[in-house]
Image (tube, rainbow, N blue to C red):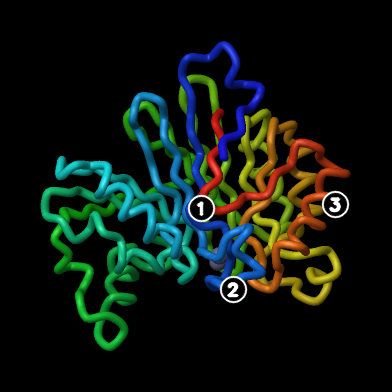
Amino acid sequence: MADVSPSASGNLECINVRFWGVRGSIPTPTASHLGTGGNTACVEVQHSSGSSCILDMGTGAHELGHQLVTQSKQEPLDLHVFLSHFHWDHIQAIPFFAPLFHERNSVTFYGSDLEGAPFDLLNEQMSVPFFPISFNNLAAKTKQIVLKDDEPVQVGKLTVTPFPVHHTQFVFGYKVEAGGNSVIYCTDYEHGIQKYDERLIENASDADLLICDAQYTPEEYSKRIGWGHTTWERAARVAAQANVKQLALFHHDPGHDDIQLGEILNAAQQIFPNTLLATEDRTIVL
Ligand SMILES: [Zn+2]
Ligand SMILES: [Zn+2]
């Protein structure tokens, strides 16, 4: 389904944001959850020029990989993957990402080195006995780029700028911009540390779309302080404070079924009316 934001009018350039995985922590392929989606975090951001980047590679990236290979018609793919951090729900599809198994393709991974070199971490999840093919033996050409706070990277027409987010460990949020449009990806965020809360508001200020962690209800959060996630209520208040145009609630709790998420959406809209649920296969046009 496609939603057209107010900023799309009169602007020839546009950014498509497609959700391939919206669930947090663990995939939930159960019937009661599939209206929203059961795959873990993966978002594709594509500019109308064709420039694109992938934000995280949770299990949603499995289907994305197949689609990219099919659409490429055997032409080389040059892909750019920005990892927020290395929890499994953000990297688990890497060993099953079809473009990595074709030598004509190039995949550049971007991330922080604060918890060890990104390639070492990715190689560990693919080492015996966890997986039979090592990261270093993948057919595609792979590259690692270590990012620093607030230092932008250019991917074609897209400018991608990382900023630090408070979680149980280091996380990068990403601001992706092109042609005056912007999307903020802020997954795995727990509020409460002023300097990080301020950085988020600053980065999200006037953005066209804020994709924000909304894992818990306020009642759940009161029992899970320090678990690294925030609430739908906090996400809605951040959206209002930062004056964003749209908010997408993201990183849904694996325990929340479609009915509960519908109730969460209604509640969030009472605080920030232009709120939507990130749902698998949804595309938002900015
Ligand atoms: Zn996560
Ligand atoms: Zn995490």
Residue 115 in view: yes
Cβ of mark 3 under 8 A from ligand 1:
no
Q: Which residue is mark 2?
A: 30
The image shows residue 121 at horizontal and vertical percentages of 34, 70
Which numbered disc, 3 or 2, marks the residue that appears first in the sequence?
2
Q: Which residue is mark 1?
A: 172
Which residue is rendered at x = 60% and y = 69% of the image?
168
Quarter of the figure with residue 49? top left
Q: From the image, which quarter does the N terminus lie in? A: top right
Q: Which residue is mark 3?
A: 267
Looking at the rendered structure, the secondary structure element under dot 1 is strand
Cβ of mark 2 under 8 A from ligand 1:
no
Label 2 amino acid? Thr
Front residue of 60/197: it is 60
The image shows residue 178 at horizontal and vertical percentages of 46, 25
Residue 192 in view: no
Label 3 amino acid? Ala
Which numbered disc, 1 or 2, marks the residue that appears first in the sequence?
2
Quarter of the figure with residue 182? top right
For the residues marked 1 and 3, what is the alpha-carbon distance in whole angstroms?
28 Å
Vertical placement of residue 274 versus 24, above or below: above
Q: Is residue 42 left or right of residue 187?
A: left
Mark 1 or 3, which is nearer the eye?
3
Do labels 1 and 2 touch, CB within 8 Å? no
Mark 1 or 2, which is nearer the eye?
2
Which residue is rendered at x = 55% and y = 51% of the image?
164
The image shows residue 102 at horizontal and vertical percentages of 15, 56
For the residues marked 3 and 2, what is the alpha-carbon distance in whole angstroms?
24 Å
Front residue of 254/187: it is 254
The image shows residue 172 at horizontal and vertical percentages of 51, 53
